[in-house]
Image: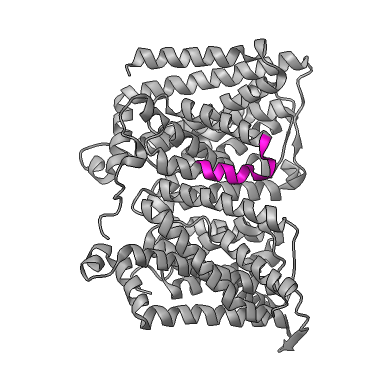
Amino acid sequence: MDVGQIIANGLVLGALYACLAVGFSLVWGVLNVINMLHGSFVILGGYLTFFAAQVIGIHPLAALVPVALILFVLGYALQATFINKVVAAPVLVTLTLTFGLDMILYNVMTVYFSATPRQLTLGLGSVEFWGIFLPVERLIGMGLALALTAILFVTMRTSSIGRAIVAVRMDRFAAALMGIKVNRIYAITFGIGALMAGAAGSVFAMVFPVTTNLSGVFLGKAFVVCVIGGLGSVPGALVGGLALGLVEAFAGVLLGPQNALTAGFVLMLLLLLVRPTGILGVKGYE
Amino acid sequence: MSNPVRIGLFAIWIVVLGSVPFWGDNAMARTAIMLAMSSVLAYSWNIIGGFAGYPSFSTAAFFGLGSYVGALCQGAGVPMPLAWLAATIFVAAFAGLIGGIVLRLRGHYFAIASIAIVEVCRLVVAAWGSLTGGGNGLNVPLLMWSPDNTILFFLMVMLALLVIIFAITVFIDRHRFGFALKCIRQNEDAADMVGVDATRFKILAYVLSAFLCGTAGAVYASWIGYIDPTDSFQIVMTVEIPVMAMLGGAGTVLGPAIGAAAFVVLEEIFWANFLDWNRAILGAIIVVVIFALPGGLIRIFSGRTRLPFLRSRSTEAVQ
C-alpha cells in the first residue's frame, strides 16, 4: 500500500485515539486513579448516540452534546459517591474498585443493549486527494476528535475550573490551602474524563460498529496512549494518540493486521522501561 | 493466632476439601477443584501483592502460559507429570525474566505493565496459530480413567499444590525474607537504604508468586482437555484473584484461603440464580469488599476491627 495512504489512515485513527484517551489521562494525572471504567464509558457514549439516532431520530452529530453531558453527570456521581472515598488509597484499591464498577456497568449494558454490534451509517461517500482515499465519516470523526481535544485544552487553560484542576494536579495540599475544594475538583475531573469518553464514543459510533465487547480494547488503547504521550496533559494525549495510530497503521501493513494491536502494547512496555514519563513528560501542566 | 493454630485450621480445611468426592456429587467435586485452584492462585498472588504490596495483575499471564506449555508438551507426547514440570519451570523462568524488567516500575505504572503482560501474552498466543492453534484453541489428551477417579485425582493434585504454596507462605511469613517484603511494602526507598536488597527480594517474590500458577494452569489444561486464548488469559481472572486475597485479608497466612472460599461460595450461589447478572454481582462484591471489609474477613475473626460502617472515613487529608 501507498505510504501516504498509510500515514493518512494512521492519523485519522490517531486523532480518534487521542480523543479517546485524553479523559483517561486527565483522571490518571489529576486523581492518580487508573479508571478501568473508561472503556465502558466510551461504549455507553456510542450506544446512547446510536439509540438517539435510531429511536428518537436525532442526528448523531446533534446527539453528541447531550450524550457527553449525560456521561459527565454519571462520572461526577460515581466519583462523588464511591471513588472520592478511596482516592488516596494505594493503586491496588482504586484500580480494583473501578474494575468492580466497570463490571457492573458492563453487565447492565450487555443486558439492556445486548452485545450485537450496531453501526450508524451516515453514507457520505469518500473523498480523494493526492491519490489518498478517505471516507467522509472518518474525516468528520477526525475533525470532531481534534476539535473536542482542542476545546478541552482551551478550557483547561482559560477557565477557573481548569486552572483549579491544574492546581490540584500540581499539589493538592497547596491547592486546598488556596481555597480550592479538592474533592469537588476530583469529581469534576472524573466527570470531564467521562464526558470526553462519551464524546469519543459518539464519534466512534459514526465510524465503527459499537459493541460492549470493545470496552476492553478501548481501555487498552487508553493505557497505551497515556504511557506513550505522558500523563494528565492534553498535548501528551494528542501526541500519544497520533503516534499509536501511525504505529498501528504501519504495523498492520508490515506485520499483518493481527499483530497491529500487539505492536502498540509492546511499544508501550518498551517506553515504560525506557522513559516512563512519556514523550512529552509530566512537567507540562495541561 | 499462633502458627500451630493456623496450620491446624488449614489442615482441617484441606481434609474437608479432599473428602468432597466421597460425600458430594460430581458438581460439588468440580467446585472443590475450582476452589482449590483459586486458592493456589490467591496464595501465589499474596506473595507479591500481599506481602510485598506490589499491585500485580499478571496472574492470568502465568496461568495461561502454564496451561499452554503443559498442553503443548502433552500434545508432543511428553508424560503428564513431566509436562506439568515443564510448565512450572517455563513460567518461573518467564517470571524471573519479566520481573527483572517490570519490577523497576512502581505503583500505577507497574499495575498497567502487569495488565499489558497478560494482553501481550494473549495476543501472541492467539496470533501464533501454527504453534498454538490460534483462536481455535488446543485439545489436550484426556485421561482414560473413570470420571470419578479422574475428578478425585485432579482434586488431590490441586490440593497438593495448595499445600506447597501454603507451606511457602508460612515460611515467608516467619522468615526474614517475609520481613524484607513487608519492609518493601511500607517504604521501598527506606528499606533499600537500611540494607534490604529490594531488587533481589522483589524478583524472588515475583517468581514465587508465578511458578505454581503455571503448574495450576497446566493441571487445569489436562483436566479440562481443551484451552483457548480467551479462556486461558482472562482479564477478569487477573482481577478476581487479588480480590479473593483482599476479601480474606491480603498479606496474611489464612486470608487467601478464607477469601477464595467465600468468593467461590458467593459465585456459586449467584451464578445459579442470576445467570445474566453474574458479572455485575462480582462487581458488587468488589465494591463491598473495598468499602465494608478493608482488612479482609480475617479481621472480623481476629476481632481487630470495629464495625466498618461506624468508623469515620477520612481517607483524604484535605477537604
* Residue nearest the viewer, comparing B155 with B277: B277
Please provide percent x and percent y for residue A166.
34, 72
Residue B278 occupies quadrant: top right
* Residue nearest the viewer, comparing B254 with B274: B274
Does residue A212 belong to the magenta stretch? no
Q: Is residue B13 above or below residue B224?
A: above
Q: Quadrant of the N terminus of chain A?
A: bottom right
Please provide percent x and percent y for residue A274.
42, 58
Please provide percent x and percent y for residue A276.
41, 59
Q: Is residue A93 above or below residue A195?
A: above
The main secondary structure of the magenta stretch is helix
Can residue A170 be seen? yes
**Left or right for B48, reference A262:** left
Residue at the image point whose x is 78% and y is 83% from the top:
A125
* Residue nearest the viewer, comparing B285 with B205: B285
* Residue nearest the viewer, comparing B260 with B145: B260
Q: Is residue A18 above or below residue B30?
A: below
**Left or right for A265, reference A80:** right
Residue B173 occupies quadrant: top left
In this view, the residue farthest toward the bottom is: A129
Residue at the image point whose x is 35% and y is 49% from the top:
A89
Which contiguous range is marked in magenta? B273-285
Please provide percent x and percent y for residue B140.
75, 30
Q: Quadrant of the C terminus of chain A?
A: bottom left
Q: How many marks?
A: 0
Can residue B89 be seen? no
Does residue B279 belong to the magenta stretch? yes
In this view, the residue farthest toward the front is: B310
**Left or right for B138, reference A198:** right
Indicate the colouring scheme: one colour
